[in-house]
Image: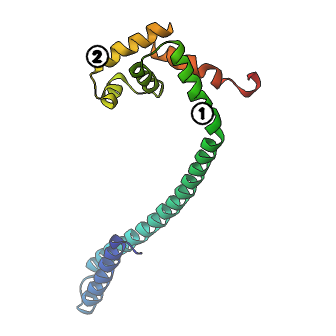
Amino acid sequence: MIPVAVVVFALIALLIAWDIAIDYRAGTDLVHLISESAVMLLALAGAVALTWQLRSSRQLARQLTVDLVAARREAAQFREEAQTSLRGLGEAIDRQFERWKLTAAEREVALLLLKGLSHKEVASVRSTSESTIRQQAQAIYRKSGLRSRSELSAFFLEDLLLPSAER
């Protein structure tokens, strides 16, 4: 499909060419004809430039689509391969929460904190106040013997992130 701007530039160039032909027959001076010719060439150059940019953009869009499909396929493959491990990790996290004697609310808050949500976001998800979430987070840290969200994350993720040779 030809974009409207290209058609407009081409029509402008065509109209200017028609005007140049009429002016030439009428005996208009050479300077006027040259200036109108320059405007016509600029309009044609605009049409060509827009066409070139459109082709480049379409080519880039096609490549990005191919890349996106490949990335989605790779992500799906990773999820499929990691599903068993992730299920096991989830169960292990649950068992650790039980050992720490976290309440159901504290477990939910701890999971949301592990997922990277801020206190404000956790409060929104749980339909409670941010101060309640801060108190629950403090209870989680106290019961677990950890001092912060980063220590909580590190507790569960540290051994997962070792290079393959160290596992």
Residue at the spot 31% in from the left edge and 73% down from the top edge: 39
Is residue 146 in sight in this rendering? no
Left or right of 97? Residue 47 is left
The answer to which of 117 and 62 lies nearer the viewer is 117
Disc 1 crowd, CA 10 A, few/some/many (<14, 14-19, 20+) = few
Q: Position of residue 70 (x, y in %)?
A: 60, 53
Residue 67 image position (x, y, % from top left): 57, 53
Query: Going by the image, does 50 lie left or right of 14?
Result: right
N-term-proximal mark, 1 vs 2: 1
Q: Residue at x 39, y 15 (%)?
A: 137
Q: Name the foreground residue: 20 vs 118.
A: 118
Disc 2: which residue: 131
Marks 1 and 2 sit apart, C-alpha to C-alpha, by: 31 Å
Looking at this view, is 47 or 45 the one in front?
Answer: 47
> Where is residue 111 shown, x and y percent of the image?
46, 25
Q: Nearer the viewer, residue 117 or 42?
A: 117
- The image quadrant of residue 20 is bottom left
Q: Quadrant of residue 139?
A: top left
80 shown above or below 19:
above
- Residue shown at 29% from the left, 81% from the top: 16
Q: Badge 2: few (under 14), some or many (20 or more) residues near its Cα, within 10 Å?
A: few
Q: Is residue 115 left or right of residue 78?
A: left
Q: Is residue 140 visible?
A: yes
Point out residue 130 in the picture as x, y percentages from the top left corner.
29, 20
Q: Amino acid at mark 2?
A: Ser
Which image quarter is the N terminus in?
bottom left
Residue assigned mark 1 = 86
